[in-house]
Image (cartoon, rainbow, N blue to C red):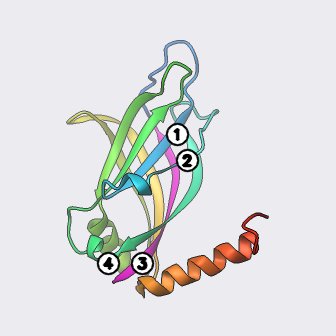
């Protein structure tokens, strides 16, 4: 099976609905690809931007080539406000991996995009901007070997730095 590396950088959001009444918003993003909970990653919490958070946080994924061939595989980015009594949902962005891939291909595999943040069916809550880059197609065995070597070089033979 073949796959591609995906580098996703969650840049910023702006014009978000303020979900806190007293304290300032501290926003983070959760990213999920294809509904696979094992691939979920999240940004650090932005403690200063309030309704206009900025992260510039990069996440790396290995994406199976079949996921890029049909519109059903979604990139979902959910925004939350960090709170002591449980985090509060702000809104989310859904985009098809195929659409993102098709858009970036003519641009050399890279793109910077902004999408409206939705809460519920049609209620818009500002926008989220992110950049992404798809790598070259590679056999998954080669990718796994390269990742193992990189991990070994980073941590050493004992597994810890």
For residue 43, the mark is: 2
According to the picture, the residue beneath numbered tag 1 turns out to be 28
Quarter of the image containing the N terminus?
bottom left
The quarter of the displayed image where residue 100 is located: bottom left
Q: Is residue 44 above or below residue 134?
A: above
Q: SS class of the residue under badge 4?
A: helix
Chain-order first, disc 2 or disc 4: 2
In this rendering, position of residue 103 left or right of residue 151: left
At 58% from the left and 22% from the top, the residue drawn is 24
Q: Is residue 90 above or below residue 2?
A: above
Residue furthest top as drawn: 22
Chain-order first, disc 1 or disc 4: 1
Does 10 appear in magenta? yes
Contact check, label 3 and label 4, Cβ < 8 Å: yes
In this rendering, position of residue 14 left or right of residue 149: left
Contact check, label 2 and label 1, Cβ < 8 Å: yes
Image spot of residue 87 (x, y percent)? 48, 27
Label 3 vs label 4: CA separation?
A: 7 Å
Q: SS class of the residue under badge 3?
A: strand
Neighbourhood count class around disc 2 (C-alpha, 10 Å): few under 14, some 14–19, many 20 upward: some
Q: Nearer the viewer, residue 115 or 60?
A: 60
According to the picture, the residue beneath numbered tag 4 turns out to be 65
Label 1 vs label 3: CA separation?
A: 26 Å
Q: SS class of the residue under badge 2?
A: loop
Q: SS class of the residue under badge 1?
A: strand
At 39% from the left and 71% from the top, the residue drawn is 63
Label 2 vs label 4: CA separation?
A: 25 Å
Chain-order first, disc 2 or disc 3: 3
Label 2 vs label 1: CA separation?
A: 6 Å
According to the picture, the residue beneath numbered tag 3 turns out to be 4
């Amino acid at each position: 099976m073949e796959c591609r590396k995906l580098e996703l950088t969650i840049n910023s959001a702006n014009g978000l609905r303020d979900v806190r009444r007293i304290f300032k918003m501290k926003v983070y993003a959760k990213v999920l690809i294809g509904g696979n909970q094992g691939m979920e990653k999240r940004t650090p919490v932005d403690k200063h931007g309030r309704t206009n958070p900025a992260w510039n946080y990069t996440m790396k994924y290995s994406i199976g080539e079949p996921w890029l061939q049909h519109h059903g595989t979604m990139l979902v980015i959910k925004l939350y406000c960090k709170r002591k009594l449980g985090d509060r949902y702000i809104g989310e962005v859904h985009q098809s991996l195929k659409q993102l891939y098709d858009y970036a291909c003519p641009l050399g595999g890279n793109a910077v995009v902004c999408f409206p943040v939705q809460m519920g069916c049609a209620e818009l809550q500002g926008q989220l901007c992110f950049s992404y880059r798809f790598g070259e197609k590679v056999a998954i065995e080669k990718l796994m070997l390269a990742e193992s070597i990189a991990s070994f070089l980073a941590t050493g033979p004992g597994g810890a730095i």
